[in-house]
Image (cartoon, coloured by chain):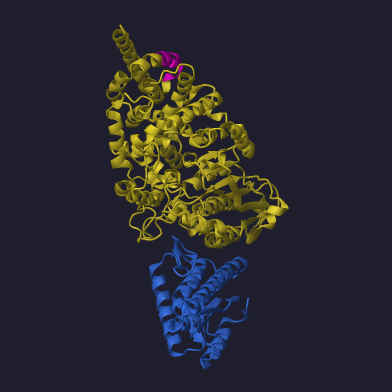
Chain colours: A blue, B yellow
Amino acid sequence: MNCEVCQLKELEVEHFEIREVLRCILHTIFFHRALGLVRPKDIDLELFEITYVQCGDMELERKIDEKIDQFIDKVEKHPNKKNQICLSFYEVKNKQATWFSNKVERLHWEQWYINLNVTQNPKGHSGKSHLPKVEVNPGDTAAEARRARRTALECSLRDILFQIIRFVNEKRDHVPPIPNLDGVSFPYEITISSSSDSAFGMDMFKRMLQTGHPTMLS
Amino acid sequence: MASSHGNTHSEPAKMEQIITEFFAKSLHIILESRSPYVSSRNNYSGEQVLSSPSPSSSPSSSSFKPRDKWFNLALRDCPAALENIDFWRQSNLEPMIVDVILMQRPNDWDPSSFSPKRGLARNSSGKERYYYGSDNDECGCEAKNEKIIERWVLQYESKKSSGNGGGSSGSKRSSSTSSHALYKKSILLLRSLYATVRLLPAYKLFRDLISSAQIRLYNLGHRVSSFVEPFTHREEADMQRFVFTPVDTSCGRLCLSVLYRSSVLDVSSEPSTPISPQIIPEYVGSPMAEPLKRFPSVPVSQSSPSSSPFGRRHSWSYDLYRASPPSMNPSPSPTYSESHASLSKQRSHRLPPAGLPRHLHDETPAAHMKNPSYDEYSPSPVFSPSPSPSPPPPTYVSGGNITKALLRSESAPVSIPASRLSSMPSLPNNQLMLPSPPMKGTRFTVSKHAAHPGLHQTSSTVDKLFSFSKDEPGKMLGVKPSTNSSPSKSFSRSSSRLSFQDDYDDSEFSGPFIVDEDDMVDPGSRPGSFDLPGHSSIPHEPGGIFPVKKSQDAAVGALVHMLKKAPPLRQDISVTTQLPQGSKLHTLRSCMQDTNETSEEPTSNLSSSGLIASKTTADALEELRGYREMKDLLIMQSKISQA
């Protein structure tokens, strides 16, 4: 089976933005892949003028938050690294053992890579710390800069959401038949990696082997 | 899944069904997040207590309606969509074009002209519907600023014959897989549509419109049709296009695209207008307030006693000047909206009287020109009673949930306006020819009249009666309550309202009704007190849900206003405010006259008051008889007193 891969554009986020940004992206992807019966929920982001859609599955929400916690943990432990979250959808096949010899095989049919670059020393903060010493002006510019940055991030985030939508529009044929009416219809996994992890390359490699021929980078 | 449609159907039939449902679902998705009359967001999470969503729509655990199962996507109720789609279904997979229209209001717009209403119209072929969020589009008294900010085009391009699946695809080998594939791809496409509508700039407008208590100087409307004038190049240059990848089927493909204006945002940033006294009057007519008007619908449908307070809210909030269209045409047929539109047009001219009386006449034509499509229909109010295929009672029952809801939603406001309208013919005459001031009697009779479908033929009688009653306003009024008690609350309400209105003409009479009016207003119409009870009752009445939902926000907004104790919301809220407005009233009347001229036969309007809907002809006759008796009595009395 074909495995489609979508590399989402990199986002530069501040620490406090991670959660919301990731939620937004992950839920949006899930909404497009939870093909069972769902009752969508609109969520307005607090930091940005963006509304995204959840598929209204509590369990999924919990899992996503869990993964985001892990991700934030990781970011805190290994600052200065580019971090990546991979969401993949697969089918379980009880096929015969190939030479990889897994009885139960996960056939990945789609992978999404979310690339976050967490900035450690946001300009906004430095502006704040200087605030006592310096007069109003620098503070203003800092706020200005923060606002500009925020706006830029909002745009990028919106772009990413459109990227997701375009992707799911263009790639429809590889989506397996909908197995059931559960909202979250396909099995999935979320993995976290950071670029400097030596494991990362290995992980990618394994996955490529497992899933056959990834069509790289959409 | 494809399993949701039975195996019994042939493959082409299945495909056709999927396609049809796809259109319906798409429209639903679009309008759900563009038509401010449906609060698609009120119930999206439990955190909004006020909006306590109906059980059917909020908890995800709740049972899904059959409609929800299509494409595995459960949506909130959206009357606008349901109604339009019913319409579209009759057309044979024609293209569906949904225009989302941004209507901006000038800063100095006249409040009353803005009293939101929903006009929907169709042309005779039934393929086009206009569904406006507010009537400002027909209002000629302001520089109207209306532009299409989104155009959704939904189309099934069939390779062969018309897409009605005439069995031609039976030859296809893998036909069974193709319907499954079609279904799956449709699901995928609809998901992205769902997400996309929320990412486009117009969504922000919609969200602000329904979720904030602030007054917005714009509103959103929409128009569903199968044919539209293409944009000019210049217009199109301002727009961006997003094309969803078409879904191929064995005999054609489903195409969906949107043309949208990316620069809508300048509007949304400006409109958060600070609440100033100048603007406050608008609030009543603001989009947020609109839902309130529809509250009455809920009680009506439940026929609960609470209906009277609800109904009242109406009356003060917006009908005073309103010749409400629905009243004219109780029939569920789309035409009635038309009447709505044309009337409101006139009304709006009429309304601005204070500042802009001179505009009245100049602008009417302009308005018409701007809305040519409406022009054709403008006479419809007059004639509507006759063409409307179904008489009031059947109407009420017949049109499924949707129509019912619509009907209901409008019925309450209707009744009052109807009487108002009906009174217009006579009013202006009196005003202009016989300066004799007291109109109460007149109105009284008129409103009575309005409540009775059977009455129109008796207009002459009414007139007579009317001339008598003029002399005896007090008596007439006194009679009223008892008489009206049976027919309907709204009826009596309307009459009291009328008498209320009279007060400025006739200062000698400040009867109990004024007080009554105020009292009534308080319990029911105060938004604050209103929401909770309203909502608690709503969930049980599935049909009546939509009108109410959205009004939460409106109610909150209203509450804020109340709390601020700003100057009177509107002239008609309290007597005191109104008194100084005698001059306005005059203008109003002359405007009303205009209306009459347009609607040649006032009586026809009368006949179709929304109230009637629930009555049978027999009832009406019965009441008519009663009224005749009463009339005779009154005449006698007046003779005596004159003597």
Q: Tell whether B183 sits left or right of B574.
A: right
- Residue B271 is situated, as x and y percent measured from the top left of the image, at 50, 54
Image: B240 above or below A59: above
Q: Nearer the viewer, residue B408 or B293?
A: B293
Q: Nearer the viewer, residue B505 or B469?
A: B505
Farthest-out residue, bottom: A198
- Residue B446 is situated, as x and y percent measured from the top left of the image, at 40, 22
Farthest-out residue, right: B233
Q: Quadrant of residue B300?
A: top left
Farthest-out residue, top: B643
Image: B179 above or below B600: below
Q: Tell whether B157 sits left or right of A83.
A: right
The number of discs equals 0
Q: Tell whether B485 sits left or right of B193.
A: left
Q: Nearer the viewer, residue B330 or A177?
A: B330
Q: Residue A120: within the magenta? A: no
Quadrant location, the C terminus of chain B: top left
- Residue B433 is situated, as x and y percent measured from the top left of the image, at 48, 17
Q: Is residue A99 visible?
A: no
Q: Tell whether B563 sits left or right of B288.
A: left
Q: Main secondary structure of the magenta part?
A: helix
Residue sitting at x 59%, y 59%: B182
Q: Is residue B375 visible?
A: yes
The residue range painted magenta reads B455-464
Q: Residue B457: within the magenta? A: yes
Q: Nearer the viewer, residue A75 or B501?
A: B501
- Residue B167 is situated, as x and y percent measured from the top left of the image, at 64, 48
Image: B267 above or below B592: below
